[in-house]
Image: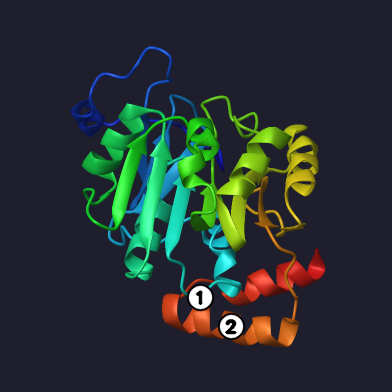
Amino acid sequence: MLIKRKSIEKEESSRAPTRKAKFAPVTLSEQDGVRYLHFGTEWVQGAMRIRKPDWLELEYAQQMMAWMLFISEPRQIAQLGLGTAALTKFCYKTFPEATVTAVELNESVINICYAMFKLPPNDARLQVLEMDALEFVNDAANHGRFDVLQCDLYDATARGPVLDTAEFYAACNACLTDNGIMTVNLFGDHPSYSKNIKAMKHAFDHVICLPEVHDGNVVAICFKTRPTLDYPSLKERAAAIQTATKLPAKSWVRGMQAS
């Protein structure tokens, strides 16, 4: 859930199985070489540049990778809410030693990602699960398991994350390793923002919000253990990330300093 533009259902979307009645229709649009995912509305749920399918096209998605400033070699990464699989694909490609787990409730979203957004099939390092994110984080088998959680849980109404309670964020915290980090996509212009920030600060030792992008999106960085913010070292790390991945990591550090 990012920006507004007209939703045009493409003929190719018929390749996805019939949606479950409780979900909004999965629709697609394309403009200037970028394919967008919608849930039957003008709200964009994700994007992919067709000629660069593994690139993070949207700035908020790039900010969701800000945990890289603190964790250089993750072993286990989980994505809550698949969208166009942009973050899932990027992590899978960028960290070949890590396993990546994506959790998505809507089967049609999973299938459209395979058909239209270049999501690779499951293998020894990649697992896409059709299940409720709340069930996933409450499963004791997942507690203490992940170095990184990335949370982007929106529905067609775009009124804020569909899971936003203190209990949900506490369960997310429980899934992290001792120095684990969670990044969350929030909608800063909506009343849900304050509720989410309060719940996160209750559940996590430290929370930093990056500057708003896309006229509304705010990425929160939630630390299980409060970090030492050594900005000279973070700037060096950001420069290395930017050289290796082309992500605008230097701007993340500037945003953290300004928060």
Q: Quadrant of residue 230?
A: bottom right
**Residue at 46% from the left image edge and 68% from the top image edge:** 74
Alpha-carbon distance for marks 1 and 2? 9 Å
Q: Say what amino acid the circle numbered 2 marks.
A: Arg
Q: Is residue 47 left or right of residue 195?
A: left
**Residue at 39% from the left image edge and 45% from the top image edge:** 102
Q: Is residue 91 left or right of residue 53?
A: right
Q: Is residue 194 above or below residue 132?
A: below
Q: Nearer the viewer, residue 244 or 166?
A: 166
Q: Nearer the viewer, residue 244 or 183?
A: 183
The quadrant of the rendering that contains the N terminus is top right
Q: Which mark is residue 72?
A: 1
Is residue 32 visible to the viewer in this orientation of the structure? no
Q: Which residue does the numbered mark 2 point to in the structure image?
A: 237
Asked if disc 1 and disc 2 are in contact, CB closer than 8 Å, the reply is yes
Secondary structure state at the residue bearing disc 2:
helix
Q: Position of residue 165 (x, y in %)?
A: 70, 32
Q: Which mark is residue 94?
A: none
